[in-house]
Amino acid sequence: MSGLGKIYGNGTVALQDVNLSINEGEFISFVGPSGCGKSTIFKLIAGLEERSSGNLEILGMTPKEARKQSEIAFVFQDHTLLPWLSVLDNVLLPLELRGMPKARRVEEAERALALVGLLEHRKSLPRHLSGGMKMRVSIARALAARPKLLLMDEPFGALDEITRQTLQDELLNIWQQDPSMTVLFVTHNTFEAVYLSTGIVVMTPRPGKVSAVVDVTAPFPRDESFRTSAAFSAWVREVSEHMQH
Ligand SMILES: Nc1ncnc2c1ncn2[C@@H]1O[C@H](COP(=O)(O)OP(=O)(O)OP(=O)(O)O)[C@@H](O)[C@H]1O
């Protein structure tokens, strides 16, 4: 992103001069006050909104090209599963829309469900699953097409703390299995950002700009001992301080 700006039709300046370069395979979290433009950045990346100024390139392509080639997938806080379809059919749906042959579709969907530990629930309906399980299905649906870029907008915001931490570990495991997959993650939770990320982008209040990028250089795999370490607290403090300035 260089000089990236977004002014909505009603005149709201959501983003101003955002400059950011993210390497393949990174796990980058975006934190900042409500309304600072985090979701707007995602919408521009996803090609759902047009930028007003500047440049944005994804894997050497425009957002729309990247989306067409199924290089981008999303996970939102609201799991958006179709209630009348089974777990497997929910995961199959986007593959079907892309015209993937049936046998391959089932193979990819089952691979993704196995990654999130839900293969044995493939025939269940969403209403028979817990909140954490629905989120896992939503992650499986995003992973089924093997995206190069995974956009996650506050995916764990509605979950209880224990489930949230379990899913954080599962997500890190999945990400580590594919070194070329880049994850961009929006969260309001500084602890979550530090635990998951290789880097954290701290944004200013509207109009959103990048106020700091904090590298979290702790090695992977990460576990409870990282969460309780002095280094972890120091990174949380650093991010919080940037958020207050
Ligand atoms: N379609 C739209 N039309 C007009 N203004 C919009 C539109 N979408 C977002 N905005 C405004 O742009 C600003 C940035 O919104 P955005 O949703 O990107 O922020 P955010 O950082 O994701 O917020 P939150 O943390 O509350 O989800 C806000 O002031 C919002 O009201």
Image (cartoon, rainbow, N blue to C red):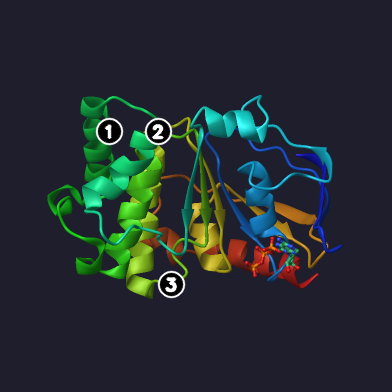
Nearest-to-viewer mark from 3 and 1 = 1
Ligand 1 neighbours mark 2 (CB distance < 8 Å): no
- Tell me: 150 left or right of 143: right
First in sequence: mark 3 vs mark 1: 1
Whole-number angstrom distance, CA of label 2 to CA of label 1: 9 Å
Q: Which numbered dot is residue 146? A: 2
Q: Earlier in the sequence, mark 2 or mark 1?
A: 1
Residue 182 position within the rendered picture, expressed as x and y whole percent measured from the top left: 52, 38
74 over 202 or under it: above or below: above
Q: Which residue is mark 3?
A: 158
Q: Tell me what residue is drawn at x 22 percent, y 47 percent.
A: 88
Disc 1 is placed on an element classified as helix
Which quadrant of the figure has residue 37? bottom right
Ligand 1 quadrant? bottom right
Q: Which corner quadrant holds the C terminus?
A: bottom right
Query: Label 1, on which residue?
Result: 108
